[in-house]
Amino acid sequence: MATHTGVAPPALAASAAYILRGNDIGTLTTAAPRLYPHLWSWDAAFVAIGLATVSVPRAIAELRTLLGAQWTTGMLPHIVFGPDEGYFPGPDVWGATTPSGARTSGICQPPVHAIAVRRVLDAGRRNGGADRDLAERFAAETFDRWLAWHRWLATARDPRGRGLLEIYHGWESGMDNSPRWDAAYAAVRPREDLLRGRARRDLEHVADARQRPTDEEYRRYLWLVHQMKEAGYDDDAVRETVDFRMTDVFMSAIAALASDVLAEIGDELGRRAEATELRALAERFRGGVLSTVSPDTGLARDEDVRTGLRLDAPTIGGFAPLLCGGDPRVFSRQLALFTGPEWCGHPDLRYALPPSTAPGHAGFSSRTYWRGPQWPFMNWLLYWTLHRAGEVDLAMSLRAEGLRQLGDLAFGEYYEPMTGEALGSAHQSWTAAVALDWLIVPPAG
């Protein structure tokens, strides 16, 4: 199957592998060669998924680097800083160092890591021999570390046991400037001097500044970092003092999905009690997600914890129930919405893939980060989850469209949904990684 440019799968796979190799600095794979010169938490999980198709040992090394920066609380930080000192906001802004000496940020990202462990295990077993032994030993040796991460989320970030994870910065969602967070950010009043004298490196690596968050948005982002740093990154203190406190329905759905996946690994390792605990967490988060679904729109909704208001911005986050399941009627309605004319079936889309915000919504912007563009790693996550749920035809359609989109060989960070133009940073590691998984792993896998 050739892509839209006529690029054959072997050539696409070779290009993707070349990018991952080029972004590898030894101890970690940078998220992108210039714009993101460090390791990001959920990027690392997707990168490991791609690396596992070509080198199980290197995929394991990627995950071990992330685990090496795990906090004593169990949190996996959203950035592990490498040697590059030019990135802003860097370790001097965060002021966070682990007992192991790792320099990190002070917040987290969605817990997709169990899926990466699952895929590494699958790759090792497919290969057999030394790869199988290494993958199975890695899963056994690190299981308690992944479990600690899930336990931290279930306590520190779901303090009321509602099955809805709280976030204290839009960066924690991974969807930094999504319309999901507009109302909450509007209430944040940062100091005006927070960017004074600071060069935003991200704007040096995109041709059009409209693709990135604005300076005003960045001031709010930095103010929240300042507040958390002032609170010493103490979970209880941050919760009570930070100006941004939202439940994240998509992150909660990932927690449900990943807890189920980690439970399956626990079963294979003979960790029955822990597997039972994880399945209880999965059920809790699944129930939390389903409790937010709007009877009017059919989409799941985030909540501003400070005001109690649920927010109805039509973004990809609203499809959280597609990840966690739990109610066949909700799932069926979501599938109809997802494939319908407001989303993947929109007549103006170049590729039948989900935009990050619904076209036509007031917050939609086709070239701006999480306000409209399509994200290849998100297409993979939905593909894998839907395939796992038995929606094979739709999953394979996402795979086919996703590969066509990546046939430009730019491996963009995100894509303009109407024209198919690659936007943001080129040669993005997790984009190359999902291409490899799509191309090399048998479709039924």
Image (cartoon, grey):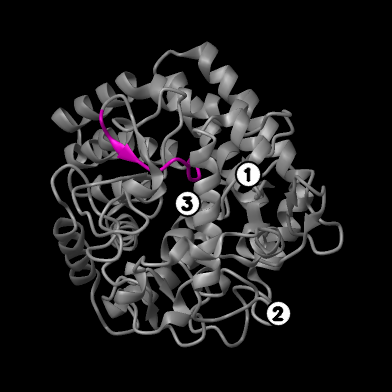
Q: Is disc 1 placed on a helix, strand or loop?
A: loop
| Marks 1, 3: nearer the viewer | 1
Q: From the top left corner, tell me how far across and down residue 59 is, in percent.
A: 24, 41
Identify residue type, mark 2. Answer: Ala
Determine which residue is flagged by label 2.
362
Label 2 vs 3, first from the N-terminus: 2
**What residue span does the magenta drawing correspond to?**
101-111
The quarter of the picture where residue 182 lies is: bottom right
Instruction: Pick whichever of labels 1 and 3 is earlier in the sequence.
Output: 1
Image coords of residue 327 (percent x, y)? 75, 44
Q: Main secondary structure of the magenta part?
A: loop
Which residue lies under the disc numbered 3?
384
Going by the image, does 125 lie left or right of 22? right
Residue at 33% of width from left, 57% of height from top? 430
Determine whether the residue tagged by mark 3 lies in a helix, strand or loop: helix
Q: Would you identify the image quadrant in which residue 3 lies?
A: bottom left
Q: Mark 3 packing: few (<14 Cα in 10 Å), some, or many (20+)? A: many
Q: Nearer the viewer, residue 292 or 185?
A: 185
Q: Label 1 amino acid? A: Val
Q: Position of residue 359 (x, y in %)?
A: 64, 80
**Which SS class for mark 2?**
loop
Any magenta on residue 103? yes
Question: Which badge, 2 or 1, is on the more N-terminal residue?
Answer: 1
